[in-house]
Amino acid sequence: MKISVPRETHPGESRAPLTPDSLGKLVKLGAQVEIEAGLGLAAGFSDEAYLKAGAIITADRKELISGGDIVLRLRKPPVEEIAWLKQGAIHASLLDPFNEKELVQKFAEHGVSAISMEFIPRTTRAQKMDVLSSQANLGGYVAVIQAASHVNKIFPMMTTAAGTILPAKIFIIGAGVAGLQAIATAKRLGAKVTAYDTRPVVEEQVKSLGAQFLKIDLGETGQTKEGYAKALTEEQIQKQREAMKKTCGDSDIVITTAQVFGRRAPILVTNEMLDAMKPGSAVIDMAVESGGNVEGVVYDQVTERKGVKIVGVANLPARVPLHASQVYAANLVALVEEFWDKKEKTFVLKLDDEIIKGCLITHGGKIVNEKLLPKPN
Ligand code: NAD
């Protein structure tokens, strides 16, 4: 079976879907793995390293993509490249399927079995394939590093001959995978951290990292069976904003990570809250790619409002591309290994398997994923 891996073409994308080590694992399974020249250069992996691991390297992208029984990528493909895929090929990458209706339709029309890595179910068995978690974890780390370079002070407390410097105060909104890593990173740097999330189960996790949990009584909030937050009502959001305004005003840094699966991120930090913050402080919006949690945030830009920096830098995991590629590739390889028939040396698309049912979005010329099909009345 041939696995083809083209280079990422999205502007600013430095991550690679496979590293030499992970490629070596696929070769060991008996797969023929062909990659596009320069695949990992931006992440720090040379073509020679891939060659050593057993790769075939080509500069002919079209031939590479059209020859693959399985095509592995990181981001969604440019729409025009879907027509290059073999009928019956398997394509696995992030696909943003709720927002990419045309792309999904094209995959179906071309008879490709498209796997959306966002849809890997959140079960214990599938944890090792969970790219959202592996990338969000690194994103949380980078958000704190970004914050450190945009705020006007240091993080730790210092007692010096010139007096005592008090620790920076950081408020983290949304304590899922990214938020918890941001808390841990900020604590390591010596900051005083407060965090908030609508899912009540998070309080214990926040406290175990040594941070304070901001309690806001919003009534019923809860989470889905996969651990995602449910969307709040307008009234709940209003109540939340009022309660958070004071903590924002009291903080040197606010990091927002709040997302609601499949929907636009909620606006949590309003202009009024920004105005309550001190000049020189900074807000990092980690939800900028799904619309942003901060009013007025500009995608992939750092802007300023009355002396407060609003950091909307996108694709934070790509700022640490070596490790981001390493963990993304490990997730992909775990998926391939799980469904690999060692005797036949092929990937078996088990349509009745819970993981495949969760993440397969097109197959046999049709859209097959229930999350993308019209809801029955
Ligand atoms: P996410 O990226 O969808 O959201 C980030 C955080 O924002 C979440 O904690 C969410 O509760 C919070 N949020 C949403 N709306 C908010 C609001 N209005 N105000 C404040 N916070 C808000 O979520 P995620 O980080 O990918 O995952 C959430 C949880 O899923 C994890 O903490 C974990 O418990 C669970 N999980 C389970 C598995 C597994 O079982 N395999 C894998 C990964 C994550």
Image (spheres, rainbow, N blue to C red):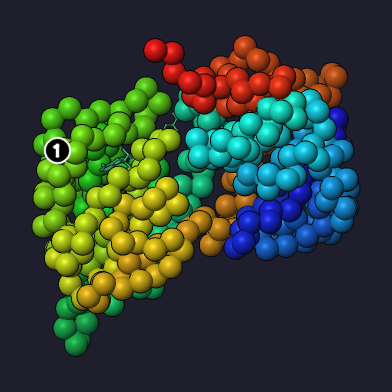
Under mark 1, the amino acid is Glu
Classify residue 269 as left or right of residue 55. left
**Residue 143 visible, this angle:** yes
Q: What element carries label 1?
A: helix
Residue 245 locus on image (x, y percent): 14, 56
The residue where tag 1 is placed is 235
Residue located 85% across and 19% down the image: 344
Residue located 65% across and 25% down the image: 362
Classify residue 220 by image quadrant: top left
Classify residue 155 by image quadrant: bottom left
Q: Residue furthest bottom?
A: 162
Q: Quadrant of the N terminus?
A: top right
**Residue 22 visible, this angle:** no
Residue 81 vs residue 208, the one in the foreground: 81
Give the crowd class for mark 1: few <14, some 14-19, many >=20 residues within 10 Å.
few
Residue located 19% across and 87% down the image: 162
Residue 124 locus on image (x, y percent): 49, 25
